[in-house]
Image: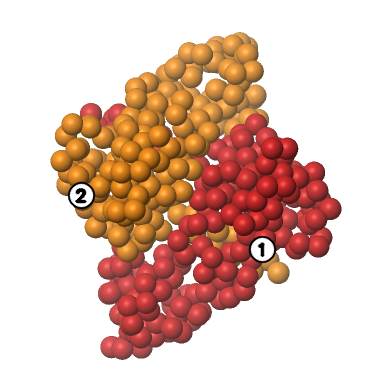
Chain colours: A orange, B red
Amino acid sequence: MSLYLQCLEDARQRGSTTISSEALARLGGATSAQIRHDLAIFGSFGRRGLGYPVPELVAHLREILGLNRDWRLVVIGAGRIGSALAQFPGFADRGFTIVGVYDNDPRKIGHRWDGHPIRDIATLAADAPREQYDIAVLAVPVDRAQAIADLVVATGITAILNFAPVPLRLPASVTVKTVNMTMELELLSYALAHRR
Amino acid sequence: MSLYLQCLEDARQRGSTTISSEALARLGGATSAQIRHDLAIFGSFGRRGLGYPVPELVAHLREILGLNRDWRLVVIGAGRIGSALAQFPGFADRGFTIVGVYDNDPRKIGHRWDGHPIRDIATLAADAPREQYDIAVLAVPVDRAQAIADLVVATGITAILNFAPVPLRLPASVTVKTVNMTMELELLSYALAHRR
């Protein structure tokens, strides 16, 4: 669904007002039958021979994905990963706004990071009720990830994007997505090693 | 397998010479039966009552994953994503070395980026035979990703780590892994939106 939205937004930027399931399939790397099936689940949008109305479908997919509102992100670990994330294409215009940045390094605390003041991780629990963070981005070392995740969850945050290449054990009420770049690279080296 | 290796390397750093399947399961978030099953596929390592010998298992997993040699990475797009990747924990010590950085921005070409000179993307094809790049990291805008991937593949590179949130259409002989941070965040916003 996220990929369809990406393709539809590209199409809208190019000025398209309607798009056929065939064109959407070509953009998204699926079959047109798959597209029609997937989109039918979310209501009847396509008109036979006319295709899908791009703006309406964009609005509907954004609503389903929870992108029709702003999400307040807190970045834990004021390093390059969080910084890269903040600059990621399509990130800010999808409603993800970084509103707080924390670190535990006294050399960093109080300095600015991409315009945000870096706060002391020790103040996270006190700040959280006021700041209403929705999603925590964990960009911390592997051996600190679980402890910091526990701290984050204790403040009431229920969604975590984890960049530490380690599985986190958290209550079922918390949604965690892990971006494990090391593992992706290892899958590539595995493929290369076994191809030769 | 990548996660087992991570857990085993952590154990080795803490000075462990053997580890039980139960301890490995606890670290990796699996069951001990699953661990024994997975590791049995790659040869008989564990000794009943003694556990797995950590250094031997680390060496064996590294060999299977193709980590017992160096991989030469070329980063296309001298921005923050590539920079974050280069600093990623456990990245350099797994044998992934950035040996070339390219961009198409005349303001960047010739400058240094994390110690590497930024080269003109127009010279990639000419450099590739000499540089023997194994893996290309694509950190380029969505609307340029397919064209640059085609260029990379034409130079003979057969493994791509793609950070553009778009599927790439490439020959079956090329292995592509996409790290889609926008999609991971959208999965979180979807979970939050439907929980409330």
Left or right: residue A171 compared with residue B128: left
Residue at horizontal 32 percent and vertical 78 percent from the top: B14
Q: Amino acid at mark 2?
A: Ala
Which secondary structure lies at badge 1?
A: strand
Toward the viewer: B76 or B18? Answer: B76
Residue at horizontal 33 percent and vertical 38 percent from the top: A117
- Residue A51 shows which numbered tag? none
Residue A140 in sight here: yes
Q: Quadrant of the C terminus of chain A?
A: bottom right
Residue A29 rendering spot, x and y as whole percentages: 62, 36
Which of label 2 and label 1 is nearer to you? 2
Q: Which chain is home to disc 2? A: A
Residue A41 in sight here: no
Left or right: residue B49 compared with residue B101: left
Does residue A54 lie above or below B182 as drawn?
above
Does residue A192 lie above or below B150 as drawn?
below
Q: What residue did someone put label 2 on?
A: A122
Residue at horizontal 24 percent and vertical 57 percent from the top: A147
Left or right: residue B26 compared with residue B171: left
Residue A193 rendering spot, x and y as whole percentages: 64, 69
Looking at the image, which residue sits at the far right? B126
Q: What residue did someone put label 1 on?
A: B72
Q: Amino acid at mark 1?
A: Arg
